[in-house]
């Protein structure tokens, strides 16, 4: 492109708290990196998404010493891009960057598959402040997905907040005598400075004691101490995450295939029981599935997606080089 033999690719990862752009060449050498704030259109709007995209792309290109016209392909994982009907609006938000190369736009959870699986296909399951699950077939022609972390009505509420609410349910059951006493109760009373269980329940109901996603740390701590109710919350969360994965597995007919499930998000650090129950649920549907943690910057998956969209087949070893380079340049950035 542009009369040059070397090909250059852009990867973009836009999330609800931060956004990254990475420019790399065909050998996987990371040449430029740009970081910015949140860009999810659902929380900041499309104009701010465009501003963030322009900012981080400009930073990455400036570090690489390249103009936008030198790019041969771009892959973008955009938080909040959940439905095909939203593609036109997202393409319009991307247009001001001035890309003349092929551009692929996917949900940001899909980048975890490109970056975290050894062959760029399989599943990703996100469990952080929220949850998500995406899948790609071996030939990249079919995508599987859940609704997009919709919440209670679709049973996609296994992020930090949903898990904490499940723990509060156990406390509520103690209060109403529908369930046994749990160590979660005194822990929450202490956290909020409530007078007693009655005061705690009233405060939660009327919003005086707001439950937030960071409260999941308390749940993990109580579970590590062996409290049965807290342990059951983690068992439930693992089964729910596994159930979401099983749905995507069936959508893609992967039940008899060997493939990787890429685990993304901070909740997987909380307690091993959650991942164990998740694996058990998944293996009941797909015995050949292998669970792996994402250990690569998702934005590197954007570069690999950009290569694929441009019809470029990277040489052996490029993926490894790209991921290592992306780690280094992101750390330096």
Image: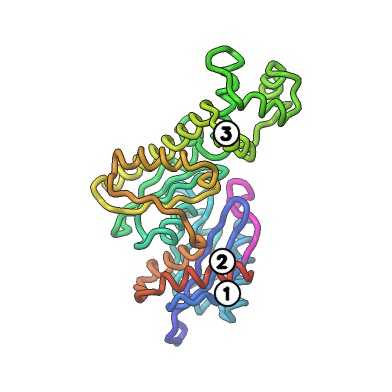
Q: Left or right: 152 with respect to 311?
A: right
Q: Residue at x 56, y 66 (%)?
A: 21
Residue picked out by circle 1: 32
Q: Quadrant of the N terminus?
A: bottom left
Query: What number is the disc on residue 315?
Result: none
Q: Nearer the viewer, mark 2 or mark 3?
A: 3
Query: Which secondary structure, mark 1?
Result: strand
Q: Position of residue 252 (x, y in %)?
A: 30, 47
Q: Position of residue 159 (x, y in %)?
A: 53, 40
Residue picked out by circle 3: 225
**Magenta-colored span:** 35-46
Q: Nearer the viewer, mark 3 or mark 1?
A: 3
Q: Left or right: 142 with respect to 98?
A: left
Q: Is residue 71 above or below residue 256?
A: below
Q: Tell me the crowding category of disc 3: few under 14, some 14 to 19, or many 20 or more residues within 10 angstroms, Cα based.
A: few
Q: Residue at x 45, y 65 (%)?
A: 103
| Extreme residue in the left direction | 256
Residue picked out by circle 2: 21
Q: Position of residue 141 (x, y in %)?
A: 31, 57
Q: Is residue 72 above or below residue 221?
A: below
Q: Tell me the crowding category of disc 2: few under 14, some 14 to 19, or many 20 or more residues within 10 angstroms, Cα based.
A: many
Q: Tell me the crowding category of disc 1: few under 14, some 14 to 19, or many 20 or more residues within 10 angstroms, Cα based.
A: many
């Amino acid at each position: 492109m542009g009369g040059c033999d070397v090909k250059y690719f852009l990867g973009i990862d836009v999330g609800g708290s931060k956004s990254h752009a990475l420019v790399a060449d065909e050998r996987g050498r990371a040449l430029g990196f740009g970081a910015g704030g949140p860009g999810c259109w659902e929380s900041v709007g499309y104009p701010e998404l465009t501003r963030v995209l322009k900012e981080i792309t400009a930073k990455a290109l400036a570090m690489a010493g390249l103009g936008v016209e030198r790019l041969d392909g771009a892959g973008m994982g955009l938080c909040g891009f959940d439905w095909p009907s939203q593609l036109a609006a997202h393409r319009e938000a991307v247009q001001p960057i001035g890309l003349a190369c092929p551009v692929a736009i996917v949900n940001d959870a899909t980048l975890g598959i490109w970056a975290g699986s050894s062959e760029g296909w399989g599943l990703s399951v996100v469990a952080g402040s929220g949850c998500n699950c995406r899948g790609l077939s071996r030939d990249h022609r079919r995508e599987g997905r859940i609704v997009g972390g919709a919440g209670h009505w679709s049973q996609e509420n296994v992020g930090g907040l949903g898990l904490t609410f499940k723990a509060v349910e156990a406390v509520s059951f103690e209060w109403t005598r529908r369930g046994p006493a749990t160590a979660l109760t005194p822990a929450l009373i202490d956290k909020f400075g409530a007078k007693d269980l009655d005061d705690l329940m009233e405060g939660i109901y009327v919003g005086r004691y707001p439950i937030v996603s960071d409260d999941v740390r308390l749940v993990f701590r109580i579970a590590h101490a062996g409290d049965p109710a807290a342990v059951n919350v983690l068992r439930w969360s693992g089964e729910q995450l596994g159930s979401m994965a099983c749905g995507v597995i069936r959508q893609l007919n992967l039940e008899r295939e060997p493939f990787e499930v890429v685990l993304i998000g901070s909740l997987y650090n909380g307690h091993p029981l959650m991942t164990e129950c998740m694996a058990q649920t998944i293996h009941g549907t797909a015995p050949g599935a292998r669970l792996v943690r994402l250990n690569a910057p998702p934005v590197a998956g954007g570069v690999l997606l950009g290569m694929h969209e441009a019809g470029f087949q990277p040489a052996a070893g490029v993926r490894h080089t790209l991921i290592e380079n992306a780690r280094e340049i992101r750390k330096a950035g």
